Image: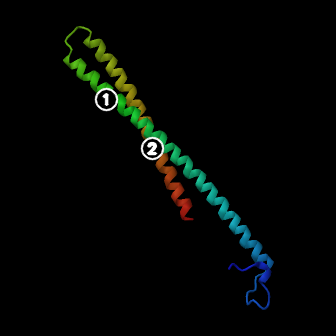
Amino acid sequence: EPISLLDFGDDSGIDLELDDFLQLRIKLDEQEAKLDFLKEKLERIHVAEVELLNDEDKITDLLEAVQKDKRGLLNSSHSSGLTEARKLLIRLCDLEDRVLCKEVEVQHLKLDISVFEMEANN
């Protein structure tokens, strides 16, 4: 059974001053606020992770489409092959830019996770 503050007296053997109780309550409130902050940060990191995974799936689909187009161009012998190759090159450059942007986002997510771990350890 938990000890009530009302039970703290000379006969209980526990001397707890009101100031001590207030300090403990303040520390508890601070810890609760920190826990709430860390939970919110963890949720944001989780949302970012899900978004990155979805983007990764889209990029994979685009890469597969580019590979399909590449195979089609290699098997094509008509005169518009050069035009199609240029279009494919433009798509590849666009895709490369998007992949690099996602790499930067992944690095930011890793930094957020590191900061979160450091804060959780404190």
Residue 32 against residue 59 in the figure, above or below? below
Looking at the image, which is closer to me, 32 or 88?
32
Q: Nearer the viewer, mark 2 or mark 1?
A: 1
The quarter of the displayed image where residue 58 is located: top left
Split into 4 quadrants, where in the image is the N terminus?
bottom right
The residue indicated by pointer 1 is 64
**Left or right of residue 10, residue 70 in this image:** left
Looking at the image, which is closer to me, 104 or 31?
31
The mark nearer the N terminus, 2 or 1, is: 1
Q: Are the residues flagged by discs 2 and 1 in contact, CB closer than 8 Å?
A: no
Residue 11 against residue 82 in the figure, above or below? below
Q: Position of residue 76 (x, y in %)?
A: 21, 14
Q: Amino acid at mark 1?
A: Glu
Residue 24 against residue 91 in the figure, above or below? below
The quarter of the displayed image where residue 7 is located: bottom right
Q: Amino acid at mark 2?
A: Val
The quarter of the displayed image where residue 30 is located: bottom right
The figure's colour scheme reads: rainbow
Q: Position of residue 117 (x, y in %)?
A: 51, 58
Split into 4 quadrants, where in the image is the C terminus?
bottom right
Looking at the image, which is closer to me, 82 or 62?
62
**Left or right of residue 97, residue 8 in this image:** right
**Badge 2 local density, few (<14 within 10 Å), some, or many (20+)?**
some
Instruction: State the SS at label 1.
Output: helix
Q: Position of residue 67 (x, y in %)?
A: 28, 27
The residue indicated by pointer 2 is 106
Q: Residue at x 65, y 64 (%)?
A: 31
Q: Residue at x 48, y 39 (%)?
A: 51
**Left or right of residue 103, residue 77 in this image:** left
